[in-house]
Image (spheres, rainbow, N blue to C red):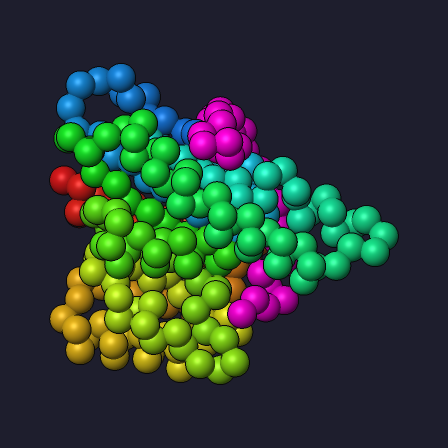
Amino acid sequence: MSCEDCFKTVPHAGTPLGKTETIAGVPTYVSEPKDASTPGQKKILLFFSDVFSPFYINNQLVQDYFASHGFTVLGIDYFFGDRFSTLQKEPGFSREVWRDKSLKKAAEHTPKWVEAVSQRYGTNDVKYCAVGYCFGAPYVFALANGANFNLAAGAVAHPSGIFKANQLKVDVIQNCVAPMLFSCAETDAAFPAEARRQTEDILVEKKAHYYFQTFSGVTHGFATRGDPSVDAQRWAKEESARGILEWFKRFTA
C-alpha cells in the first residue's frame, strides 16, 4: 500500500553531479565515482527511487553521496518523465491512476533494465548492490531472492508495497537470500511497527543476514524527503544514508 506521506516532500538544496543516459530504453540517472576508470573491482549500485523519480533533486543528491564513496550509481526512471511533482498540479489529475500506470510501466521495464545493466558491467570483478526507497523497495526484494540476480547486498528505506490490507507479504521476506538492511521510521503507515517486527521475526527464524535502523521522531519518507531544517529529520536522513553505505561497503569489500 501507499500512504499520504509517500507523496509529501521538502526539496533539498544542492547541485547534482550525475548525468542522464538511456539504458534499455529507460531514462537513467548515472552518478560515478571520481576513480570510475581505475582498474579493479567495480561496485554497482542500482537505485530504485520513490514516486518523485531519480531525477528529483533530493534523490540525485543521495545518489551522488553513494557515488562519492566509490559506487557507480544507476537510478532507473520507471516513470519515464511523468513527474508526480508536476502532474499533481494539473486539473483532473488522479494520483491513484498515475500510480497504477507507473506500477505497470515499472513491472514491464525494470527487469529489462536490470538485465541491460548486468550486460553493460558484466559479472567479472563486479559486485552489485541495490537500494529502494518507498515505491522502489519491491524491486530490491525482487533481486534479493537470488533467482535471477547475484545481489551482494540490498537495502530498503520506509518500504511500500509489501504491507497491504493490514497483512505483510510474508513470502517477499521469506524469499530474501541477499543480506538486507531496513531503514525505518517510527511512524509509517506503509510499513508499520507490526510489519517491521514480523519481518524481523521471519529473518531471525531463517538466520538471515539483516540489519534494522529505526528512527524516532520521523515519518515515512524521511530518508529522502525529510525536512533538513528539523534536527531529528536531518540527522535521521543523514544517518540512514551513512548506514546504508556502510552496509554495502561491508559486502563489497
109 or 206: nearer the viewer: 109
**Residue 127, percent across and down?**
21, 38
Q: Residue at x 34, y 75 (%)?
A: 170
Q: Quadrant of the C terminus?
A: top left
Residue 84 higher or lower than 166, as above or below: above
Left or right of 126? Residue 235 is right
Residue 31 higher or lower than 161, as above or below: above
Residue 179 position by quadrant? bottom left
Residue 139 higher or lower than 122, as above or below: below
Q: Is residue 175 in view?
A: yes
**Residue 181, percent across and down?**
29, 59
Q: Residue at x 74, y 52 (%)?
A: 88
- Magenta residues? 1-29
239 or 135: nearer the viewer: 135
41 or 58: nearer the viewer: 41
**Residue 174, percent across and down?**
26, 71
Q: Is residue 229 in view?
A: no
Query: What is the count of numbered marks?
Result: 0
Residue 7 position by quadrant? bottom right
Left or right of 102? Residue 241 is left
Q: Residue at x 45, y 30 (%)?
A: 23
Q: Residue at x 26, y 66 (%)?
A: 175
Magenta-colored stretch includes residue 20 = yes
**Residue 15, percent across and down?**
54, 29
Q: Quadrant of the N terminus?
A: bottom right
Residue 14 position by quadrant? top right
Left or right of 65? Residue 60 is right
